[in-house]
Image (spheres, rainbow, N blue to C red):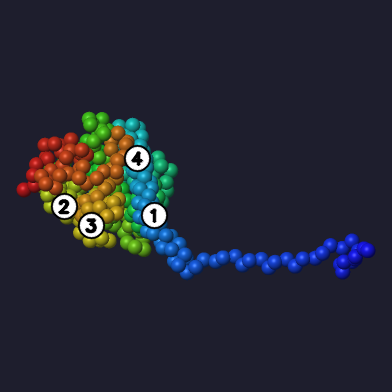
């Protein structure tokens, strides 16, 4: 006898599908562990990223100073001398005027305090110098003409593009800004090496032996024109405007370096290490300050 299922002829027996198991979720402990691991990774990576960004800004500054040295070298090859830096007799003439490097760099920028066209902006600004329009200065002793008051100090000798030892002679360097304001932007004076009194030694210009007195206005008094704080390593020695840290210097052979303060002068002896020279007279003037 043939039995016919209740599903009908040719029908298939239907089976109920089991309900899908619910997916397991994170427990509170597991979530806290993940959060702790992420926080730990961030704590480890953040200083590394900050250092990497700081080094990238230093490279931009190095490139700026190198390019300025190249343009100054081109100027010297055309005219047989470096540009003038002189206040009087009027009109004042500076290396960054349009008639000099501005023309060669194809930069035209009106000064906020003068109708003189001069170089300003990113090409002459260190990324570590906030609200600045110019961060660099030319070594006063490389100027073909400069104010006689500087010559009278007897703290250096004028030199030109054909001077020996170009790899050590400072041509351009970062300098504390002492002009301008927060609204107009801050700028460095035209020259570096001119803030000195009779008897100032090369080492004092680097900040040892008491250094020199300079009011940076934005950051207070400093004992060197060189802003070693701009590229000071995080957690390294030095603080504020102390002449401890690193600074970008460009040389007469057109190369630029990020120099540590302890490679420029010895605070133990108060003498320049003669790695970087303000003028050819540095070796004769490199004596302990009185």
Camera-nearest label, 4 or 1: 1
Tag in front: 1 or 3: 1
Q: Which residue is mark 3?
A: 239
Q: Which residue is mark 2?
A: 212
Q: What residue does disc 4 label?
A: 66
Which residue bears the numbered disc 1?
45
117 w.r.t. 79: above or below: below
Label 4–label 1 contact, CB within 8 A: no
**Mark 4 / mark 3, whichever is N-terminal:** 4
* Sequence order check, earlier mark of 4 and 2: 4
Of 198 and 91, the residue lying toward us: 198
Q: Classify mark 3: helix, strand or loop.
A: loop
Q: Are marks 4 and 2 in contact (CB under 8 Å)?
A: no
How far apart in space, not on screen, are marks 2 and 3 (Cα)?
A: 17 Å
Of marks 2 and 3, which one's residue comes earlier in the chain?
A: 2
- Between the residue at mark 4 and the residue at mark 1, the CA separation in whole angstroms equals 31 Å
Q: Position of residue 243 (x, y in %)?
A: 20, 51
Earlier-in-chain disc, 1 versus 3: 1
User: Where 217 sits versus 171, above or below?
Assistant: below
Q: Is label 1 or label 2 in front?
A: 1
Contact between marks 4 and 3 (CB within 8 A): the answer is: no
Structural distance between the alpha carbons of marks 1 and 2 = 39 Å
Distance from disc 4 to disc 2, alpha carbons, whole Å, reads 27 Å
Q: Quadrant of residue 250?
A: top left
Query: Which secondary structure lies at badge 1?
Result: helix
State the residue at coordinates (24%, 45%). Answer: 260
Between residues 52 and 106, which one lies in front from this camera angle? 52
SS at mark 2 in the image:
loop
Helix, strand or loop at mark 4 = helix
Q: In percent of the image, x 8 and y 44: which residue is there?
A: 288
């Amino acid at each position: 006898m043939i039995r016919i299922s209740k599903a009908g002829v040719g029908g298939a027996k239907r089976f109920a599908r089991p309900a899908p198991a619910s997916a397991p979720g994170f427990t509170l402990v597991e979530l806290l562990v993940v959060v702790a691991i992420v926080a730990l990774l961030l704590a480890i990576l953040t200083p590394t990223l900050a250092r990497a960004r700081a080094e990238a800004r230093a490279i931009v500054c190095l490139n700026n100073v190198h390019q300025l040295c190249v343009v100054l070298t081109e100027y010297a090859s055309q005219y047989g001398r470096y540009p003038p830096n002189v206040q009087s007799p009027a009109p004042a003439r500076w290396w960054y005027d349009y008639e000099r490097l501005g023309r060669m760099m194809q930069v035209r920028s009106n000064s906020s305090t003068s109708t003189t066209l001069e170089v300003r902006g990113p090409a002459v600004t260190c990324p570590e110098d906030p609200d600045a329009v110019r961060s660099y200065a030319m070594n006063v002793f490389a100027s073909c003409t400069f104010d006689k008051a500087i010559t009278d100090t007897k703290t250096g000798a004028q030199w030109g593009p054909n001077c020996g030892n170009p790899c050590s002679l400072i041509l351009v360097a970062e300098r504390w800004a002492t002009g301008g304001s927060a609204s107009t932007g801050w700028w460095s004076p035209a020259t570096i090496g001119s803030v000195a009194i009779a008897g100032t030694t090369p080492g004092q210009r680097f900040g040892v032996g008491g250094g020199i007195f300079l009011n940076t206005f934005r950051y207070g008094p400093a004992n060197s024109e060189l802003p070693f704080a701009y590229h000071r390593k995080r957690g390294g020695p030095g603080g504020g405007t102390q002449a401890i840290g690193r600074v970008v210097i460009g040389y007469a052979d057109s190369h630029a370096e990020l120099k540590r303060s302890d490679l420029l002068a010895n605070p133990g002896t108060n003498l320049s290490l003669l790695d970087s020279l303000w003028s050819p007279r540095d070796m004769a003037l490199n004596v302990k300050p009185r």
